[in-house]
Image: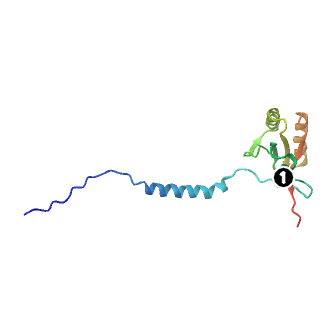
């Protein structure tokens, strides 16, 4: 009589990666949802005008921009070609950075913007220093007011 012998299974050590993929997808979703809230910077409430045109219309697509912003407390920020705004820079650093950028690209346009609550003397001081540094044209930032 033949006796029943169960088959011997060979043990294999494999890592189950499905739970790791699930965890990574959950983390990815969490980072995607929270990333818009992590932006740094100070909101500058620009004055509005009805006659201003967007800078892209004035300069074309190939021109680069340097934006200098002054917040309510008089702190300066600088951004080159829509990069992240560097906050807390000194006026001398702003002038040196603008001069360096304009040496590389002489067609770079400079614009200064101040919060509505910014002291006018802070804006004039920045404009004066840029003029002394030899920057021929400096624009002023405004929000374009929608006609309602």
Q: Name the residue at the bottom extreme.
A: 148
Q: Name the residue at the left extreme.
A: 1
Vertical placement of residue 96 versus 69, above or below = above
Q: Position of residue 105 (x, y in %)?
A: 81, 35
Q: Nearer the viewer, residue 57 or 130?
A: 57
Q: Residue at x 87, y 62 (%)?
A: 146
Q: Nearer the viewer, residue 132 or 15?
A: 15
Quarter of the rendering containing residue 99: top right
Side of 28 where 116 appears, left or right: right
Quarter of the rendering containing residue 121: top right
Report the quarter where the C terminus lies: bottom right
Side of 30 where 97 appears, left or right: right
Q: Residue at x 81, y 49 (%)?
A: 71
Q: Nearer the viewer, residue 32 or 125?
A: 32
Report the quarter where the N terminus lies: bottom left
Vertical placement of residue 88 versus 9, above or below = above
Q: Secondary structure at mark 1?
A: loop
Q: Position of residue 49 (x, y in %)?
A: 90, 57
Vertical placement of residue 98 versus 8, above or below = above
Q: Name the residue at the right extreme.
A: 51
Vertical placement of residue 146 versus 71, above or below = below
Q: How many marks?
A: 1
Q: Nearer the viewer, residue 4 or 143?
A: 4
Q: Position of residue 147 (x, y in %)?
A: 89, 64
Q: Position of residue 127 (x, y in %)?
A: 89, 41
Local crowd size for mark 1, using a 10 Å CA cut-off: few (<14), some (14–19), many (≥20): many
Q: Residue at x 82, y 47 (%)?
A: 70
Side of 1 where 125 appears, left or right: right
Circle 1 residue: 115
Q: How is the image coloured?
A: rainbow
């Amino acid at each position: 009589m033949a006796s029943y012998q169960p088959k011997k299974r060979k043990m294999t050590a494999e890592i189950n990666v499905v739970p790791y993929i699930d965890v990574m997808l959950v983390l990815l979703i969490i980072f995607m949802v929270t990333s818009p809230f992590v932006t740094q910077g100070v909101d500058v409430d620009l004055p509005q005008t009805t006659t201003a045109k967007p800078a892209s219309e004035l300069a074309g697509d190939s021109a680069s921009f340097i934006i200098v912003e002054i917040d309510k407390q008089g702190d300066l920020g600088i951004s080159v070609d829509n990069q992240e705004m560097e906050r807390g820079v000194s006026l001398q650093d702003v002038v040196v950075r603008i001069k360096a950028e304009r040496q590389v690209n002489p067609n770079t346009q400079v614009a200064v913007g101040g919060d509505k609550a910014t002291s006018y003397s802070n804006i004039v001081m920045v404009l004066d220093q840029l003029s002394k540094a030899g920057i021929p044209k400096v624009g002023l930032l405004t929000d374009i007011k929608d006609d309602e």
